[in-house]
Amino acid sequence: MRISTFILHIDSYLVRLGLASTLNRIQGVRVLKEFGANDSFTTFLENHPVDYIIIDQAGFDRSVDFFISKPELLELTILLKDPSKEDLNMGLPLRDVHATLYLTDEKETIIQTIRNLLHHRDDTYKKNSSENLSPRETTIVRLISMGLTNRQIAEKLFLSAHTVMTHRKNINSKLGIKSVSALTIYAIVNNIITIEEVSSLPQA
């Protein structure tokens, strides 16, 4: 079974605890890390691939510069909103986030929303993977996920850097994935590399 990893960035400890408990009831979901009001989650995201980020409005507004610099992460972001509070936006369209949950949602509503997201993601991966990677491309995906540069991959596989770049373009075309972080998530989900292997890699 595919495991979907989540991080939570929610100011309220009680809300964070309750949401983590709710997510843990969903088969195939793993809460990787929790962050509160005074915690910086950006460094963690720089070094650890995740499937989804659940963040409250206050945390989102504080982190707007980070999301502007890494807009691809908005596709992984689920905004936890308080219906009683006005959206601040801070210049970043909230429509760009992947989905929205509300503090007033019942547990079963949250569970069903998350299940729907996971089901849609699985369908997307199957569609994107309809044209299978070759063994060579799979090897290159693994090495990219391990943090190797094009030159390092070329040396390891006895290829030219140009050939590696061509393989990477083909991989991006087949999967519809452009960022290294998203490719790493793909590699984890498709058992090309384990999350433990990624987590154990030395950080740059």
Image: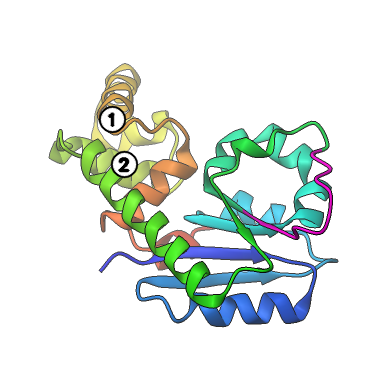
The span picked out in magenta is 79-89
Q: Which residue is mark 1?
A: 171
Residue 172 versus residue 95: which sits nearer the camera?
95
Q: Amino acid at mark 2?
A: Val
Q: CA distance from mark 2 to mark 1?
A: 8 Å
Residue 66 falls within the magenta-colored stretch: no
Tag shown at residue 141? 2
Please report the residue visible at 25 percent of the width from the left and 26 percent of the height from the top.
159
Q: Secondary structure at mark 2?
A: helix
Identity of the residue drawn at 49% across and 59% down? 201
For residue 32, above or below residue 77:
below
Give residue 163's mark.
none
- Residue 148 at what x, y percent from top left? 43, 41
Query: Are the residues flagged by discs 2 and 1 in contact, CB closer than 8 Å?
Result: yes
| SS of the residue under disc 1 | helix
**Which of the 4 image quarters holds residue 64?**
top right
The tag earlier along the polypeptide, 2 or 1, is: 2
Give the label, 2 or 1, closer to the camera.
Answer: 1
Q: Residue at x 67, y 69 (%)?
A: 104
Query: Left or right of 73: which side holds 131?
Result: left
Residue 88 sits inside the magenta stretch: yes
Looking at the magenta stretch, what is its main secondary structure?
loop
Find residue 146 and report its horizontal and vertical position in percent: 41, 49
